[in-house]
Amino acid sequence: MAKQSVIFPEALALPAIGQGTWYMGEQAHQQRAEVAALQAGIDAGLTLIDTAEMYAEGGAERVVGEAIRGRRDEVFLVSKVYPWNAGGQKAIAACEASLKRLGTDALDLYLLHWRGPFALEETVAAMHTLIQQGKIRRWGVSNLDYDDMQALWQLGAGRECVTDQVLYHLGSRGIEYDLLPWCQQEQIPVMAYCPLAQAGRLRQELMSDPVVKDVAHQHNASVAQVLLAWVISHRGVMAIPKAGSVEHVRENAAALALTLSDEALARLDRAFPAPGRKTPLDVV
């Protein structure tokens, strides 16, 4: 049976595939299609929506706000704070600005986008304050590697972190060396961004690879669905692909019902093996 959900703290079951919004909100003429895609995703069960103040400098949050108007209770809403806003009053102001653009009173999850000038202690303190103020319900991090997570775990309140959002796909498996096993051990869900790979040579390589295409054919699925099913086949991992059209988002949602055979998983592993040593965390 395909994995339908990932369990977050408080026994909260979230869909194993959500919706990313990177590059949304950049072109006014595309906003209607972007809103329609997000709404179709909600209808299809992809009720986690991930955005950030960085995306189109708030433009993506405005698109999300339009898409969830009147449907806020159906959605698990995630946004991210710039590293240079991730402490003290700057964090409060950044969160309030995101809430205004999203048209909501509170975020379900607020993430540190990547590590920056503020000490982790200051970011953790800011997140705690935002929870006390009712502006966010949970907090987590993004683009933090194994050593960063160890530093975070040394802080008492750092262990309130509920997720790490990192780049992860079949062609980028570095987190499997230490970060992913540790997150699984600590029962920290991993949110995989760019699960279909970022545009460019690597994405084309994955999309045109004969093994991936043959696995897709054998499972009566698209290549994109195979790549998503591969990501979420890992325990505690969810995928947040961006889809700019209704057709694309429905294709993504259908991957929730796809179970790759053991043989297929083994073939994909041989075609795109995980590194056998520590590698720098991939970031885009």
Image: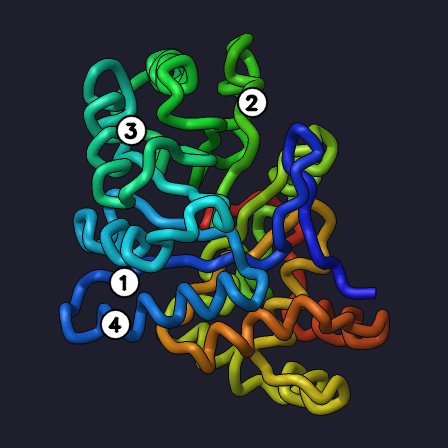
- Place residue 22 in its image quadrant: bottom left
In three-dimensional space, the C-alpha distance between marks 4 and 3, rounded to whole angstroms, equals 34 Å
In three-dimensional space, the C-alpha distance between marks 2 and 4, rounded to whole angstroms, equals 43 Å
Picture layout, residue 47 above or below residue 141: below
Q: Does any portion of residue 268 appear in the rendered image?
A: yes
* Number of the label disc, if any, that sits on residue 24: 1
Are the residues flagged by discs 1 and 4 in contact, CB closer than 8 Å? no
In three-dimensional space, the C-alpha distance between marks 2 and 3, rounded to whole angstroms, equals 16 Å
Read off the residue under disc 4: 32
* Number of the label disc, if any, that sits on residue 14: none
Picture layout, residue 20 above or below residue 83: below
Give the residue at x 23% y 68%. 31
* Number of the label disc, if any, that sits on residue 150: 2
Read off the residue under disc 3: 116
Residue 125 horizontal side relative to residue 221, left or right:
left
Q: Does any portion of residue 280 appear in the rendered image?
A: no
